[in-house]
Amino acid sequence: MRTPFVAGNWKMNKTIAEARALVSEMAPELQEIRGVEKVLCPPFTALFAVSSLLIGTDIGLGAQDMYWEEKGAFTGQVSPLMVRELCRYVIIGHSERRAYFGETDASVNRKVAAAQAFDLIPIVCVGETLSEYESGQTAEVVARQVREGLKGLPAEFGSRIVIAYEPVWAIGTGKASSGENANAVVRDIIRPALAELFDPQTAQATRVLYGGSVTAANAAEFFQQPEIDGALVGGASLKAGEFVAIVKAAAG
Ligand code: 13P
């Protein structure tokens, strides 16, 4: 059985004071919800403040990216050692990083390997752009992102990785994929790619989330799909009521 998983990716939003206010508002209600792994991913600058508010709760903390080197002359970067001081999770390969900051399958692969080395759980994002979708390249693109992003890792770690299928055309557009379409991508592309890379058991054990315009109103449509194990939520994770409702929907 795969435990449902819901993470909020705050992206580049919330000052420390705003982050504290949001967490204080949602944490008591999130705490009440059982049977779902819940994770908040604030910006780096708010991680420390949020981590102190989450002590003694069952709510996890994640970073939105990291570099793969442990330390050294890499101005502006944050290392896996530093992330691990505060977090259990780290988002890797988000499409915004691929589109704006030069992230590639090769850099994703190095970061995922660093996550393994530092005992972090990576939330690895994959998904096709609008033009790739329209030209029928979804299968090829998503399979390649999984294969290249996760290659060279042991199967025991494979089943701990969380994958987020986030079609780029659905992110921040208000135009979510249908539950059926997302389910088919996970069933026909992502799990077979995992089976090939690791083995069929690992492919079945790995959590795969959907992301892209998930709201309290449409979350249940995704969570009732047999292959979808939760959500990576952007905009709706910045509103306490919305995010709590999405986590509740995942609890069933
Ligand atoms: P939205 O939920 O705002 O569409 O963002 C999805 C996303 O990119 C989560 O990582």
Image: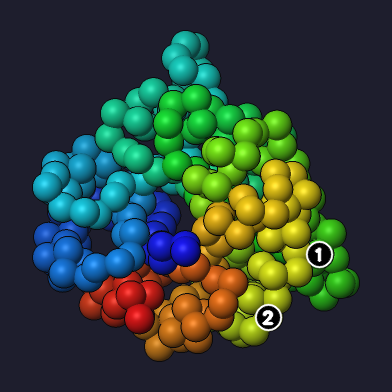
Give the SS element for disc 2. helix
Q: Which residue is mark 1?
A: 139
Crowdedness near tag 2: few (<14), some (14–19) or many (≥20) residues, C-alpha within 10 Å: few
The quadrant of the picture occupied by the C terminus is bottom left
Q: Position of residue 223 (x, y in %)?
A: 47, 78
Residue at 85% x, 66% y is 137
Q: Residue at x 87, y 72 (%)?
A: 135
**Which residue is found at the position 32% from the left and 38% from the top?**
87
In this picture, is 134 found above or below 88?
Answer: below
Labelled disc at residue 172 = none
Whether 179 is drawn above or below 155: the answer is below
Is the residue at mark 1 in contact range of ligand 1, meaning its CB lies under 8 Å from it?
Answer: no
Q: Position of residue 181 (x, y in %)?
A: 68, 80
- What colour scheme does the image use? rainbow
**Residue under circle 2?**
181
Question: Which residue occupies the foreground of this view, 104 or 209?
Answer: 209
In the image: residue 203, left or right of residue 207: right
